[in-house]
Image (spheres, rainbow, N blue to C red):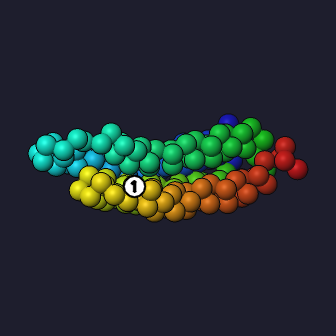
Amino acid sequence: MEIDTALCIASAIGVVGLSAVGSAVGIGKAACATIGAWKKCYAQNKPAPYTLFTFVGAPLTQTLYGMILMAMLLNVSKTPIPGAGIASLVLALLAGAGICASAVFQGQAAAAGADAQAETGKGFTNYLAAIGVIETVAIFVMVFAIFCILPLSASAS
């Protein structure tokens, strides 16, 4: 196996791995806060809104963005141009870090949203809008990374 091919495959693994780490951390933060919010509701004999579960799942999409980049990098590994391996590795590390950070901070915002929603019963759409802005960062990173991946394959020429 050529070095560029191997590095492209390693990059594919790296970008989805970093994205998944961010999702896991973000989901963990949001889940803990949501469980705490439900507990507050139960302690006050108020119904615990299931809609709070929306906050738990918000950071999951970043893993999907990493998976899309992974698939593209695996495609590049079939016919990489010379030097594509190093370029894909740098791209995977930086794009993966950006997507990871988006998921972590989205989880933190989702945690605050779950707590606030349970306490007040108000503002759900506002909280989702704020979470959506954080999501946009991951989408931008993915799209810009796709622009950079496209010229790395000899079949694209």
Q: Is residue 60 rendered to the left or right of residue 114?
A: right
Position of 21 relative to 86 (above/below): above
The one nearer the camera, 10 or 97, is 97
Residue 97 x/y as whole percent: 49, 59
Residue 47: x and y, percent?
A: 23, 41
Q: How many marks?
A: 1
State the SS at label 1. Answer: helix
Give residue 145's position: percent from left, percent from top: 66, 57
Residue 105 in view? yes
Give the side of residue 15 with respect to residue 48, left or right: right
Residue bearing mark 1 = 124
Q: Residue at x 23, y 56 (%)?
A: 119
Q: Identify which residue is drawn at 34% across, 46% down.
A: 52
Q: Residue 82 or 25: which is nearer the viewer?
A: 25
* Residue shown at 56% from the left, 60% from the top: 136
Name the residue type under label 1. Phe
Displayed quadrant of residue 20: top left
Disc 1 residue crowd, few under 14, some 14–19, many 20+, Cα 10 Å: some
Q: Quadrant of the N terminus?
A: top right
Residue 6 visible (yes or no): no
**Residue in the picture at 72% in, 39% down:** 75
Q: Nearer the viewer, residue 69 or 140?
A: 140
- Is 23 placed left or right of 6 in the picture? left
Q: Is residue 81 left or right of residue 67?
A: right
Percent of width and height locating residue 45: 13, 43
Residue 123 vs residue 12, the one in the foreground: 123
Residue sitting farthest toward the right: 157
Query: In the orientation shown, which residue stands out farthest toward the left?
Result: 43
